[in-house]
């Protein structure tokens, strides 16, 4: 019998790491074995390089640099280690950034334990794996030679980069608390940004904003 795929979990939330390990262990799947975990970029880099696993499950957003930072520090040194992003974010820019940095796949945290186990085995075998709607982001990014040039939008140009980030998450249906956690800012700061965006776009509520963002392909 072949050796199980060794898996290392990187996420800044200890409870989530514990949940992933328990979920995978509970499957009784002898194809995979969780061999380690880390809660920060620095810790992950040290542990992965000292004892390389087959697959790293990688959170995209962490306070000290995120999954892309881990990729950039490890991938060139250990090209045989496969990275699979496991994130709450389904934003196109997040997907594209980690794939360009060297990840082999990207799945969201809504994935089931069985689906995650299958994804781990598949990326270890050389496949690229994405949650259903995310594959299109990657295809678009790597075939952008034929994409139309972006159209200048004076209204959109009024928004700061942070306001655009908040708007994108708002338009995807995130609550203020979730946006704050995603961007590592306070709920009060989110409210301030939303008020500013409403004022600049002359919209009266989040539903109008969502439609406005969708029309400009921000979602």
Image (cartoon, rainbow, N blue to C red):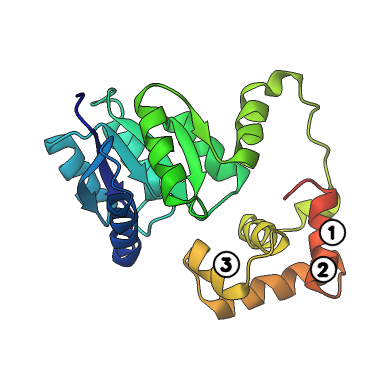
The answer to whether 126 appears left or right of 173 in the picture is left
Residue 70 horizontal/vertical position (percent): 32, 42
Secondary structure of the residue carrying numbered label 2? helix
Residues under labels 2 and 1: Cα distance? 6 Å
Residue at 80% x, 52% y is 214
- The answer to whether 139 is drawn above or below residue 169 in the figure is above
Number of marks in the rendered image:
3
The residue carrying mark 1 is 211
Q: Please tell me which residue lies in front, 31 or 214.
A: 31
Identify the element where label 1 is drawn: helix
Q: Where is residue 43 shown, x and y percent of the image?
A: 20, 51
Q: Is residue 77 left or right of residue 82?
A: left
Q: In this figure, which residue is indicated by the disc labeled 2?
A: 207
Reading the image, the residue beneath label 3 is: 179
* Residue 127 in which image quadrant: top left
* Residue ranking furthest to the left: 50
Give the position of the N terminus as an image quadrant: top left
Residue under the point 54% across and 53% down: 89
- In percent of the image, x 76 and y 25: which residue is there? 147
- Cα gap from disc 2 to disc 3, whole angstroms: 16 Å
Q: Quadrant of residue 74?
A: top left
Q: Residues within 10 Å of mark 2 (few under 14, many from 20)?
A: few
Q: Which mark is residue 121?
A: none
Q: Is residue 82 found left or right of 159 in the rendered image? A: left
Q: Indicate which disc, 2 or 3, sits on the residue closer to the N terminus.
A: 3
Q: Is residue 177 above or below residue 106?
A: below
- Label 3: element kind: helix
């Amino acid at each position: 019998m072949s050796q199980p795929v060794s898996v290392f979990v990187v996420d800044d939330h200890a409870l989530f790491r514990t949940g992933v390990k328990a979920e995978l262990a509970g499957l009784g799947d002898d194809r995979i074995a969780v061999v380690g975990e880390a809660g920060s970029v620095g810790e992950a880099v040290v542990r992965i390089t000292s004892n390389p696993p087959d697959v790293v499950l990688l959170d995209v957003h962490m306070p000290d640099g995120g999954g892309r930072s881990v990729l950039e520090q490890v991938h060139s040194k250990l090209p045989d280690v496969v990275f699979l992003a496991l994130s709450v974010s389904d934003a196109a820019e997040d997907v594209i950034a980690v794939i360009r940095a060297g990840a082999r796949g990207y799945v969201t945290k809504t994935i089931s334990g069985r689906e995650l186990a299958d994804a781990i085995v598949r990326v270890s075998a050389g496949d690229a794996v994405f949650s259903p709607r995310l594959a299109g982001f990657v295809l678009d990014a790597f075939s952008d030679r034929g994409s139309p040039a972006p159209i200048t939008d004076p209204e959109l140009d009024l928004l700061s980069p942070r306001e655009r980030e908040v708007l994108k998450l708002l338009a995807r249906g995130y609550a203020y608390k979730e946006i704050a956690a995603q961007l590592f800012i306070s709920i009060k700061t989110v409210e301030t940004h939303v008020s500013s965006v409403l004022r600049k776009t002359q919209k009266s509520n989040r539903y109008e904003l969502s439609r406005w963002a969708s029309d400009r392909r921000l979602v």
